[in-house]
Image (tube, rainbow, N blue to C red):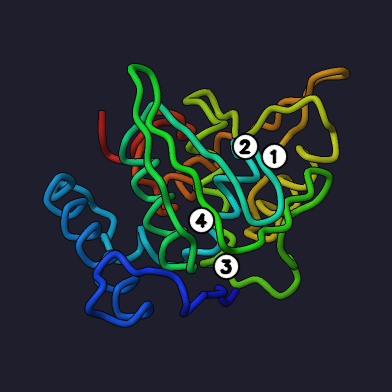
Amino acid sequence: MPCSSRSSEQTAFPFLTMRTSQLLTAVLLTSLISISRAESAVDTNTLYANPKSLVLGYLWADGSGSGEKWHFRNRNKAITDRFAAAAHVCGCEVIRRVNKDFHAAQISGVVFDMPLDRLPFDLAQASDAEIKSFCAAVIEGEGNHDGLVLDDPDRKHAEAMAAALGRLHLKTRLEGTKFFRLYAEKECWPVIQSFPFVAYGRVPGGKRGGK
């Protein structure tokens, strides 16, 4: 899914073009993550692939806002770091904030359509890699080690996530009548653990081969 960009925006590196600045920022952040996660079995380049899918997943799960102005926050710095880097590559202006509980990012300059009763992208046209990046972003904010991948008061929101995982041939079950919880079946956990996560605190079964 291609990303939009705005060449008129001020870059993080004023002496470079917007595109070069975006790529350089992503490379620098990727290098930092690579150092801090040298033990990870996941290729760091994969963690930052499909930036628009990542932004859509984070916002669809935990974002607030509309149009071209959105807010995202998470207690885990690595998650907000990836959201901010992906948004920047997509052409967004990014403002970071930190308080004692959350790492937050405000993005603007690019319009994101964020329906909650369906997926924010065309599932039929998305690649497996794009779906995995999107689902990884959702699960980092919504899941748990017991198989939960999303919970929400809107049944259609949960059903849309089930459809995305279903495209990857992963089985899920939906529980609840007023508040809906979507679980991945246990035999699917190893596949989900192979998604490009930067944090495993909410991944079903935890980190593959880890503690």
* Location of mark 3 (residue): 128
Q: Label 3 near label 1: C-beta < 8 Å?
A: no
Of callouts 3 and 4, which one flags the residue occurring earlier in the amino acid sequence?
4
Which residue was labeled with disc 2? 184
Residue density around tag 3, few if under 14, some if 14–19, many if 20 or more, within 10 Å: some
Dots 3 and 2: beta carbons under 8 Å?
no
Question: Of callouts 1 and 2, which one flags the residue occurring earlier in the amino acid sequence?
Answer: 1
Distance CA(mark 1)–CA(mark 2)? 4 Å
Identify the element where label 3 is drawn: helix
Residue 114, image x and y in percent? 73, 51
Q: Which residue is found at the position 40% from the left and 54% from the top?
A: 196
Q: Nearer the viewer, mark 1 or mark 3?
A: 3
Question: Residue 54 got which mark?
Answer: 4
Please report contact status of discs 3 and 4: CB closer than 8 Å, yes or no.
no
Secondary structure of the residue carrying numbered label 4: helix
- Asked if disc 1 and disc 2 are in contact, CB closer than 8 Å, the reply is yes
Report the Cα–Cα distance between label 3 and label 4. 13 Å
Amino acid type at image mark 2: Ala
User: Which quadrant holds the C terminus?
Assistant: top left
Q: Secondary structure at mark 1?
A: strand
Which residue is at the front of the view, 207 or 178?
178
Q: CA distance from mark 2 to mark 4?
A: 20 Å
The quadrant where residue 142 appears: top right
Q: Nearer the viewer, mark 3 or mark 4?
A: 4
Mark 1: which amino acid?
Thr
Residue sitting at x 58%, y 50%: 57
